Amino acid sequence: MNKEQIIDRILEICDRDDSPVISRAYEDGGIDPLFPRLRRAALNQISAGDAVFSRYAIWANTVRDNVRQAMDLQEQGRHEDARRFLFRTINSLSAFAEIQALCDPMEIGRPTINIDGSDDDS
């Protein structure tokens, strides 16, 4: 199989909504440190480091594990605790999108979070 066929197979396996598919491509995961992992990946990206994609993959596994934790808490009836993990996930994905807009060489995206604090648009 060539890489394009492998990508197609990965997408075929993962494109489902009835159960989670858990990647074991990277050993690291867990629910923390969520934002420090994103920071390390972003800093590696802006310095053109070699570990950009592996760092983002580790962060992605951490995001995934936050969702899994929320699902477990939901099943236990601990809805407010589950919401905290879902908010963390949403906010981490939003931070990722903002970082990518900041680093976008084609300027397709544009950062929207006001970093000077003059207006809270969150």
Image (tube, helix red, strand yellow):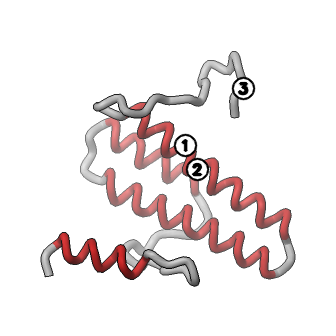
**What x and y, as percent, mark residue 68?**
63, 73
Residue 120 marker: 3
The spot of residue 63 in percent (x, y) is 56, 62
Q: Residues within 10 Å of mark 3 (few under 14, many from 20)?
A: few
Q: Counting residues from the N terminus, which is met first, the one under dot 3 or under dot 2?
A: 2
Q: Is residue 34 above or below residue 103?
A: below
Q: Residue at x 49, y 78 (%)?
A: 16
Which residue is at 59% across, 30% downward? 113
- Quarter that holds the C terminus: top right
First of labels 3, 1 by sequence position = 1
Residue 33, disc: none
81 left or right of 15? right
Give me the residue at 55% from left, 50% from top.
93
| Amino acid of disc 2 | Ser
| Secondary structure under the numbered disc 3 in the rendered image | loop
Q: Considering depth in this image, is 114 or 45 the residue closer to the camera?
A: 114
Residues 59 and 111: in front is 111
Name the quarter where the N terminus is drawn: bottom left
Q: Secondary structure at mark 1?
A: helix
- Where residue 12 sits, quadrant-wise, is bottom left
- Crowding at mark 2 (Cα within 10 Å: few <14, some 14-19, many 20+): some
Distance in Å between CA atoms under marks 2 and 1: 5 Å
Residue 26: percent from the left, percent from the top?
39, 72
Label 2–label 1 contact, CB within 8 A = yes
Residue that badge 1 annotates? 95
Under circle 2, the secondary element is helix
| Mark 3 vs 2: CB contact within 8 A | no
**67 on left or right of 107:** right
**Cβ–Cβ under 8 Å for marks 3 and 1:** no
> What's the mark number on residue 92?
2
Task: Give coordinates of residue 18: x percent, y percent.
Answer: 58, 83
Residue lying at the far top of the rendered structure = 118
